[in-house]
């Protein structure tokens, strides 16, 4: 309504301006004299202006007629499309202008205007390979997904625009959460354009979510061949996929193929903690304890981790506490100053009932990085040295409110995971797990009942009450000591 009113006001203003200008010209003295073939013509000011406008119009008509004459001569000379091109020039100019305006509208975020410009461009150009794409993007921008899907289907029917149509529908299915259909479309798109980096990444992510590890490794190899992935990153991610394909090697009845895949994953990326732990168990299953130890030592030298310590303990499950301390010294000397080394060795000394040495190994870790593990071990040390229940429970109370320390965290969304996984369960990112301390430390939860006998002793002077037991239930490291050894030490 306001726009119509504004146009009317502008039109009235222009008419008024022209009338005012005409009145001034009529009152103006003088004019223009033209002599043609001895005849003199005199024009007043207003007549001169009108004559000039007529002359411009006649020149424009003359040029158009000359262009038509040239097109006609070309047609008569055998150019069958000369006349059609002449009459289509104006339509093309208007169509391409509408197309440019539509692209500008999309860039400006004006979906409705872009839809109108796309329709106008289609009317003048009659080139669906250009206007359909603009229409689809405008429909998506304006929220009309049904219209966009219809246009993308039309694009698929055209060989020149088939990839664009498949990619568009794939992105729609992803936004709708239909990953199964999106995976099939991504496979078709990558077959048409193997070098398209976005489609490569999408297909790899969808294959990882669907646990199609063989397909994901093939897509990863394609990324390496097309130059969209550095070789060092390829080796790391190929190791992650090989590890995922291996599955849980500790499961009863693990196949030889799973064992070989675990060993291959460790070969591809020796510093990948889950791969090293799984490969060591594969070597143990084959009776190659020395190879298992070598794998774990190499990984420990790169990044000490509780899972590596637990796998190292499985090499000799029947050894005593003192024997385990002596054997774990091989790991400790690789990273003697690392916090994980101190925590593991302190736990081993506690089980061996060498509490002064456990305190010495732990050092000031409980003050410098007071997480639940360090504080829980301090409670065990105090118990072993004969401290009162009040002192022990004081450490336990501190541990209950302390952060858990390093955990598996997604680099993309910072979601905390209980276990390593190739794909983030929150944002579905691939290979983004890092063993690190959260920026916002998570408080421990009450799930550590299995450590109670070690912390408070099974022969305490006073039995634990429900309240004290609840305070003692802490998240701690997975014990690197087998249950049989704990039982022998408790019996003493």
Image (cartoon, helix red, strand yellow):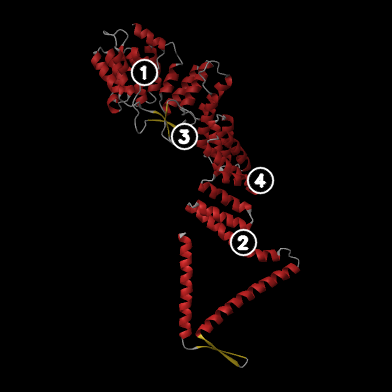
Q: Sequence order check: which comes first, mark 2 or mark 3?
A: 2
Task: From this view, report whether residue 78 is shown above or below residue 367.
Answer: below
Pick whichever of labels 1 and 4 is earlier in the sequence: 4
Element type where label 3 sits in the image: loop
Q: Secondary structure at mark 4?
A: loop
Disc 1 to disc 4, how far (Cα)?
Answer: 61 Å
Picture quadrant where residue 369 is located? top left
Q: Is residue 357 visible?
A: no
- Secondary structure at badge 1 equals loop
Q: Earlier in the sequence, mark 3 or mark 4?
A: 4
Up the image or down, 150 lies above or below 314; here it is below
Residue at image location 57% in from the left, 51% down from the top: 135
The residue to which callout 1 is attached is: 448
Residue pointed to by mark 3:
427
Q: Position of residue 200 (x, y in %)?
A: 56, 39
Q: Nearer the viewer, residue 224 or 331?
A: 224
Residue 362 lies left or right of residue 431; in this view the side is: left
Q: How many marks?
A: 4
Sequence-first tag of 2 and 4: 2
Residue 403: x %, y % from top left: 33, 27
Marks 2/4: CA distance? 24 Å
Residue in view at x 47 percent, y 53 percent: 108
Nearer-N-terminus badge (3/1): 3
Distance from the alpha carbon under mark 2 to that under mark 1: 75 Å
Q: Secondary structure at mark 2?
A: helix
Residue beneath label 2, please?
92
> Contact (CB < 8 A) between labels 3 and 1?
no
Q: Taking 396 as reference, is 206 above or below it?
A: below
Q: Which mark is residue 157?
A: 4
The single residue placed furthest to the top in the displayed view is 491
CA neighbours of label 2 inside 10 A, class few (<14), some (14 to 19), many (20+)? some
């Amino acid at each position: 309504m306001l726009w119509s009113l504004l146009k009317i006001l502008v039109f009235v203003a222009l008419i008024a301006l022209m009338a005012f200008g005409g009145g001034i010209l009529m009152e103006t003295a003088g004019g223009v004299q033209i002599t043609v073939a001895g005849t003199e013509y005199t024009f007043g000011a207003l007549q001169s202006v009108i004559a000039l406008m007529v002359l411009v119009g006649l020149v424009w008509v003359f040029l158009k007629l000359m262009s038509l004459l040239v097109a006609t001569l070309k047609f008569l000379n055998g150019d069958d499309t000369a006349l059609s091109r002449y009459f289509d020039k104006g339509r093309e100019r208007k169509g391409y202008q509408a197309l440019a305006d539509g692209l500008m509208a999309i860039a400006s975020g004006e979906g409705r205007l872009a839809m109108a410009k796309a329709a106008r461009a289609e009317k003048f150009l009659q080139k669906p390979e250009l206007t359909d794409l603009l229409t689809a993007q405008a429909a998506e921008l304006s929220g009309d997904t049904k219209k966009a899907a219809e246009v993308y289907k039309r694009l698929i029917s055209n060989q020149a625009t088939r990839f664009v149509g498949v990619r568009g529908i794939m992105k729609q299915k992803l936004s709708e959460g239909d990953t199964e259909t999106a995976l099939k479309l991504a496979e078709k798109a990558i077959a048409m354009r193997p070098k398209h980096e976005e489609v490569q990444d999408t297909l790899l992510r969808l294959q990882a979510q669907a646990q199609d590890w063989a397909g994901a490794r093939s897509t990863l190899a394609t990324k390496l061949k097309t130059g969209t992935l550095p070789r060092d990153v390829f080796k790391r991610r190929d190791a992650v996929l090989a590890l995922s394909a291996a599955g849980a090697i500790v499961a009863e009845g693990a196949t030889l193929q799973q064992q070989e895949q675990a060993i291959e994953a460790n070969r591809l990326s020796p510093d990948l903690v889950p791969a090293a732990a799984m490969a060591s168990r594969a070597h143990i299953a084959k009776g190659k304890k020395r190879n298992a130890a070598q794998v774990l030592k190499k990984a420990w030298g790169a990044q000490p981790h509780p899972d590596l310590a637990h796998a190292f303990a499985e090499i000799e499950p029947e050894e005593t506490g003192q024997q385990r301390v002596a054997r774990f010294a091989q790991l400790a000397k690789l990273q003697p100053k690392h916090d994980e080394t101190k925590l593991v060795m302190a736990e081993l000394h506690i089980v061996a009932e060498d509490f002064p040495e456990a305190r010495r190994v732990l050092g000031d870790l409980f003050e410098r990085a007071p997480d639940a593990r360090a504080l829980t071990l301090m409670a065990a040390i105090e118990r072993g040295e004969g401290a009162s229940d009040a002192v022990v429970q004081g450490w336990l109370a501190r541990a209950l409110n302390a952060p858990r320390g390093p955990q598996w965290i997604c680099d993309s969304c910072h979601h905390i995971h209980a276990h390593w996984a190739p794909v983030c369960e929150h944002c579905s990112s691939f290979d983004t797990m890092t063993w690190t301390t959260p920026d916002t430390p998570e408080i421990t939860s009450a799930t550590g009942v299995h450590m109670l006998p070690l912390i408070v002793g099974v022969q305490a002077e006073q039995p634990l009450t429900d309240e004290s037991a609840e305070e003692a239930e802490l998240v701690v490291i997975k014990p690197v000591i087998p249950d049989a050894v704990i039982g022998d030490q408790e019996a003493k």
